[in-house]
Image: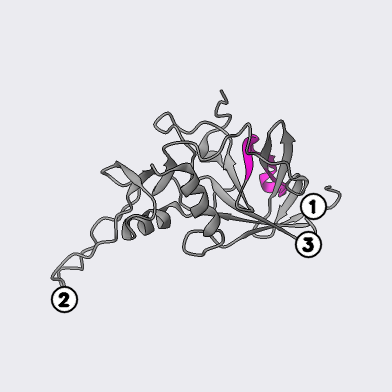
């Protein structure tokens, strides 16, 4: 069984708050021994356009190793490599963390899910991470889209009621922000795969792309 090789808090590629919302699936949605793909375009050293850091990807058995590298003299270090799987659903490529999720889950982690696209003959790569909070809200608002189970009555992300100052005559009721439900998707793996593929790139569920260019000398 694979083991977690680095703390999730050190994940290089997470670019926004994650880890709440639709965080995982009840059952794995792919078989890492059968469904991972080999794509030479993914391998190599990549330079991020949105910051001073690089990402290195190395092929390893059925999976890949990914690590962040910070060439800036003030932060000259690299992170411990993480194993990831590259899979394809209905012609769309996705990256998932290739380790068992927390013991609480038996399926696939979704808050470390990226939609991958290549351009310029493999010289440009775009990664969009799945917004698990937006997915949770959507599934709650659209019953029947995908089956799920709420896993915590106390959302990991919430906002305390914001009350106007007492001197404000309009202070009659507190205003609150919507609570995000943490959930595990319990639907059939095929339906979850199809949902991700059918909505790949949909701005309601995926971030703006993290754009990488292949570093000089990288093949």
Q: Secondary structure at mark 2?
A: loop
Q: Residues within 10 Å of mark 1 (few under 14, many from 20)?
A: some
Mark 3 or mark 1, which has the lower sequence index?
Answer: 3
In this image, 113 relative to 218: left or right? left
Label 2 to label 3: alpha-carbon separation:
56 Å
Establish if 170 lies above or below 189: below
Mark 2 or mark 1, which has the lower sequence index?
Answer: 2
Residue bounds of the magenta highlight: 68-87
Residue 207, percent across and down?
Answer: 53, 60
Residue 188, percent across and down?
Answer: 44, 43
> Is there any visible trace of residue 160 in the rendered image?
yes
> Is there any visible trace of residue 12 in the rendered image?
no
User: Quadrant of the image for the N terminus?
Assistant: top right
The answer to whether the residue labelled 2 contacts the one labelled 1, judged by CB atoms less than 8 Å apart, is no
Front of the two marks 2 and 1: 1
Which residue is identified by label 2?
170
Check residue 9 for magenta coloring: no
Task: Please tell me which residue is depicted at 63% across the width and 34% down the height of the picture.
Answer: 34
Which residue is identified by label 3?
120
Which residue is identified by label 1?
215
Check residue 75 for magenta coloring: yes
**Res. 86 image quadrant:** top right
Q: Which of 182/78 is in front?
A: 182
Residue at the limit of the structure toward the right, as seen here: 217
In this image, 6 relative to 159: left or right? right
């Amino acid at each position: 069984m694979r083991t977690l090789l680095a703390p999730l808090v050190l994940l290089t590629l997470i670019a926004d708050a994650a880890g709440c919302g639709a965080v995982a699936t009840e059952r794995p949605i792919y078989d890492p021994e059968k469904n991972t793909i080999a794509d030479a375009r993914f391998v190599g050293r990549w330079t991020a356009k949105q910051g001073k850091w690089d990402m290195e990807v190395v092929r390893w058995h059925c999976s890949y190793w990914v690590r962040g590298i910070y060439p800036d003299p003030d932060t000259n270090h690299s992170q411990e490599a993480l194993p990831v799987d590259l899979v394809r659903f209905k012609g769309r490529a996705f990256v998932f963390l290739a380790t068992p999720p927390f013991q609480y889950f038996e399926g696939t982690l979704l808050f470390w899910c990226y939609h991958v696209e290549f351009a310029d003959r493999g010289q440009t790569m775009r990664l969009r991470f799945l917004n698990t909070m937006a997915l949770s809200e959507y599934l709650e608002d659209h019953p029947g889209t995908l089956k799920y189970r709420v896993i915590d009555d106390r959302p990991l992300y919430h906002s305390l009621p914001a009350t106007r100052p007492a001197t404000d005559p309009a202070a009659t009721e507190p205003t609150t922000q919507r609570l995000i439900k943490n959930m595990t998707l319990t639907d059939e793996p095929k339906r979850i795969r199809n949902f991700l593929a059918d909505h790949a790139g949909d701005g309601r569920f995926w971030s703006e792309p993290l754009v990488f260019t292949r570093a000089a000398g990288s093949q």
